[in-house]
Amino acid sequence: MTLRTRNKLIAPTLTREMVEQLSASKNEPSWLLNARLTAWELYDTLNMPSMQAEAWRRTDYTTIRWEQAGSLVQGSSAGVEVIPAENLAPLIGEAQGGLIAAVDGKIVHSELSDALKAQGIIFCDFETAAREHEALFRTHLMTTAVHPNEDKFAAMHAAFWTHGVFLYVPRGKAVELPLHSVFYNTTNGLTLGHVLVVVEEGAQVTYLHEYRSASGVEQHMAYVGMTELLIGERANLRYVALQDWAANANDIRHERARVAANGQLDWIIGTMGGRFVKQFAEIELDGEGAFGRMSGLFFADTNQFFDHDTQQNHNAPHTTSDLLFKGALKDEARTVWQGMIKVLPNAQKTDGFQANRNLVLSKAARADSIPGLEIEANDVRCTHAATIGKLEDEPIFYLMSRGMTRQDAERLIVAGFFDPIMQRIPFEEVRARLTAHIEEKLERMAQLA
C-alpha cells in the first residue's frame, strides 16, 4: 500500500536531478529541458489527488505500490522482437503506412512509407520531432489539449515522459494507408508515453495505437500517459486506441481531443488488460459544426478495476457529440464509468448524447455508471442513458433449444452485445484479436462454473 501522511498521499520519489539526467540522455534542446523543469516544479508542489474529489472518490489508486512501480524505466535490452507479430503486421493488405514501436520506454522501431513522406506526413518519435521539427512540435506539445497543471499525474508526465509518437498531417492531405504504433512493456517500473496528433485543415487520417505488455511480471508496473488529438477545420481523424496490458499493469492517462469548425473525430477506445486503470478522455468541440464520436468497449475479470471518466464539451453552436461505452465484467471485477456533457451558453443548437451499457456476469462483480449533463444554453438536444444488467435466461434458453450449449449461447450473446462497437473498428484482424480475448475471458468463466 502507498503510505499516507497527514492529508497527503505519498507520490513516487522523482527528483529534479532525474529530470536533468533524462533530458541529457535524449540530448534535448534547452527549451524542452526548461519545459520539463517547469513541470517538475508543478509536480513537486502539487499534492496527489484527493480521495474525496469527485473524479477519484470511487477510485483507490493507493493500491499502486509506488516503491516498486515508481522506479523510472528508460529502456532495456529488449528490442522490437519481443512484441507479438500480430501487433506489428500491416493493418490493411500487405503495405505498411507507418509503424512506430516502443519497448520499456524506448523507441525500438520506426518506419514511414515513401509515399506518405512525399505528402509531407510526419510520423516520428519525440526525440526526432524535437530535433527535426522543432517549430511544429514545440507549438503543439502540451500547449493546447492536455496541460501539465491538470493534476499531479499530468505534471509527472510532463516532467518525466520517456517516449512519444508525433503524427502531423499537413493541410488538405488524405492519408490512405493507416498509421500504427505500439507501446510495449516487459519489466516492472514506471514508463510515461505520449501520443500527439495534429491534423491540419481539410486533412484526414486513420491511426491505431496499442498498449501491451508481457505477462508473468510482478504487479509493479505503472504507465502514466497522455494523448493529444488536434483536429483542424474540416479535418477528419479516426483514432483507435486499444489497451491490453498484462494483469500486473497500473494505467493512468489524461487524453483530450480538440475539434475545430466542421472537423470530425471518430475515437474508439478498448480496455481489456491491466490491474488498475484510470482514464480521462475528453472531447472539446471548439468550432461551429464540429462533430465528435467516442466509442468504448471494456471487459474486466478477476479483480481488475477500470475507471473511464469521459467529458463532451460543446464550446460552439451547432456541434454534435455521440458517446457509447459498452462493458462486461465478471468474477470480482469492478468498473466505473462517469460521463458529462457540458454545453456553454453560446453553444446553441447543440446535439449531445451519451450512453453506458453494462453486462454483469457474476454476483461479485460491480459496475457503477454515472452520467451527467451541465447545460448552460436553452436551445439544445442533450440526453443520456445508463443500464446495468445480467445475462437473461430467456435468450439463453432459446439458443439452447436450437442445439447450442449454454457456454456457446452465452458467448454469442456477449459477442452480440459488443458488436456495435466492434463494427466501428476499421481493421478486421484487430477485431478478430479483440473477439478472441473476450472469448478467452468467457472460457475462464466457464471453467470456473
Image: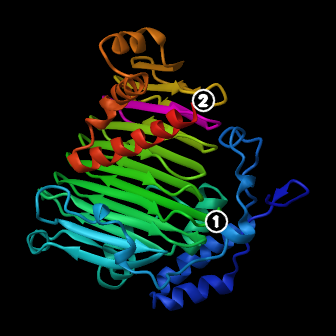
The image's mark for residue 218 is 1
Q: Is residue 370 above or below residue 82?
A: above
Question: What kind of secondary structure does the magenta stretch mostly adopt?
Answer: strand
Q: Quadrant of the N terminus?
A: bottom right
Q: Quadrant of residue 160?
A: bottom right
Disc 2/disc 1 C-alpha distance (Å): 27 Å
Q: Earlier in the sequence, mark 2 or mark 1?
A: 1
- Residue located farthest toward the right when viewing the structure as drawn: 6
Query: On the image, numbered disc 2 is attached to which residue?
Result: 367
Kind of residue sitting beneath label 1: Glu
The residue stretch that appears in magenta: 315-340
Which of these two is toward me, 18 or 382? 18
Residue in the picture at 60% in, 42% down: 302
Which of these two is toward me, 211 or 51? 211
Where residue 326 appears, as percent x and y from the top left, is 44, 31
Mark 2 or mark 1: which is in front?
Answer: 1
Residue in the picture at 37% in, 38% down: 294
Q: Is residue 180 above or below residue 361?
A: below
Where residue 219 appears, as percent x and y from the top left, is 65, 62
Q: Quadrant of the C terminus?
A: top right
Please check the rendered image and state whether residue 172 is part of the magenta-colored stretch, yes or no: no
Kind of residue sitting beneath label 2: Ala
Q: Quadrant of residue 152?
A: bottom right
Q: Secondary structure at mark 2?
A: strand
Where residue 385 appears, as percent x and y from the top left, is 48, 19
Tell me whether circle 2 and circle 1 mark residues in contact (CB < 8 Å).
no
Tell me if mark 2 has few (under 14), some (14-19) or many (20+) residues whose alpha carbon lies within 10 angstroms of its own.
many
Please check the rendered image and state whether residue 338 is part of the magenta-colored stretch, yes or no: yes
Tell me if mark 1 has few (under 14), some (14-19) or many (20+) residues whose alpha carbon lies within 10 angstroms of its own.
few
Which of these two is toward me, 88 or 282? 88
Specify whether residue 3 is in view: yes
